[in-house]
Image: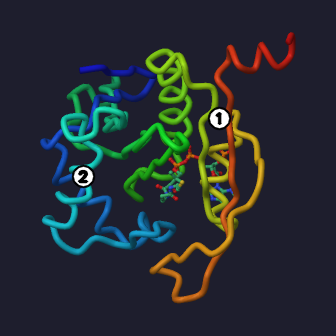
């Protein structure tokens, strides 16, 4: 199974072994505030949702569990998954998703994971040229992560329902990033 190392993190492909940590994230009202699925209440609901992200059930998806690497001050390897990053499908568009446990927010981990994931994605899926990400207009931290990882705003999408925010329909910002070779072709056609 593929894995990605960054200075502080280890990303390994998501497996059933990550279910408890997956549920800890997806049952958090804060972490699921911007999700159209909303907060998951039971481990069974989480298991069902996680199923579609496992490579065994969804060979076209590519989803990683994010772990902290050992450091000199915390030398024991941590086994707790702190976040998930990946794409669920390749068609009709490749859409990036990521969610981290609130205990680990604000430390740059999402930026480090998304940046490393996107680079690896282009290597593993060389025929794909564009990745999309959508995030609520008021999800400033997510917009910031995307901007720091090279995504550009390309439009808006209306009519999204977020259960945590009530019945009203909301707007999302649509972002895109191009594969480096697609970018080079655009600059030197
Ligand atoms: C979005 C999310 C992944 C960010 O995780 P994180 O590890 O805290 O992100 P990082 O620390 O890498 O970066 C967050 C950036 O947002 C900035 N930020 C945080 N709150 C902000 C706010 N209210 N307004 C503007 N910027 C904000 C931080 O300062 C940081 O930028 P900086 O490094 O330039 O200072 C995390 O909040 C999360 O899991 N949210 C719920 C799920 C979600 O929204 N997923 C995205 C849906 S596509």
Whether label 1 touches label 2, CB < 8 Å: no
Please name whichever residue, 84 or 121, is drawn nearer the observer in this view of the structure. 121
Sequence-wise, the earlier of marks 1 and 2 is 2
Q: Quadrant of the C terminus?
A: top right
Label 2 crowd bin: few (<14), some (14–19), many (20+), radius 10 Å: some
In the rendered image, the vertical position of residue 185 relative to residue 30, given as above or below: above
Please name whichever residue, 25 or 85, is drawn nearer the observer in this view of the structure. 85
Q: Secondary structure at mark 2?
A: helix
In the rendered image, the vertical position of residue 25 relative to residue 37, given as above or below: above
Residue 40's image quarter? bottom left
Viewed as shown, does residue 57 lie left or right of 34?
Answer: left
Viewed as shown, does residue 10 lie left or right of 56?
Answer: right
Viewed as shown, does residue 185 lie left or right of 149?
Answer: right
Q: Residue furthest front?
A: 92
Pinpoint residue 171: horizontal percent, then vertical percent. 68, 70
Please name whichever residue, 95 or 107, is drawn nearer the observer in this view of the structure. 95
Viewed as shown, does residue 14 lie left or right of 179?
Answer: left
Q: How is the image coloured?
A: rainbow
Pinpoint residue 80: horizontal percent, then vertical percent. 23, 43
Q: Disc 1, ligand 1: is the CB inside 8 Å? A: no
Residue 134's image quarter? bottom right
Q: Secondary structure at mark 1?
A: loop
User: Residue visible at 53% across and 20% down?
Assistant: 122
Residue where numbered disc 2 is placed: 50
User: Residue visible at 55% across and 43% down?
Assistant: 93
Residue where numbered disc 1 is placed: 149
Viewer-nearest of labels 1 and 2? 2
Pinpoint residue 126: horizontal percent, then vertical percent. 52, 16
Residue 62's image quarter? top left
């Amino acid at each position: 199974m593929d894995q990605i190392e960054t200075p502080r993190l280890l990303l390994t492909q998501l497996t059933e072994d990550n279910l408890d940590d997956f549920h800890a994230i997806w049952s958090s009202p804060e972490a699921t505030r911007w999700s159209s699925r909303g907060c998951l209440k039971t481990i069974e609901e989480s298991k069902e949702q996680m199923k579609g992200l496992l490579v065994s059930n969804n060979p076209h998806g590519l989803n990683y569990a994010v772990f902290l690497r050992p450091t000199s001050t915390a030398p024991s390897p941590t086994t707790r998954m702190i976040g998930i990053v990946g794409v669920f499908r390749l068609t009709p568009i490749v859409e990036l998703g990521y969610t981290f446990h609130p205990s680990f927010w604000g430390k740059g981990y999402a930026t480090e994971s998304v940046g490393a994931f996107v680079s690896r994605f282009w290597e593993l899926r060389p025929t794909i040229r564009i990745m999309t990400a959508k995030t609520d207009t008021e999800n400033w931290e997510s917009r910031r992560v995307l901007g720091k990882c090279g995504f550009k705003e390309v439009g808006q999408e209306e009519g999204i329902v977020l259960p945590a925010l009530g019945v009203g329909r909301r707007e999302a910002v649509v972002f895109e990033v191009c594969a480096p070779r697609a970018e080079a072709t655009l600059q030197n056609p």
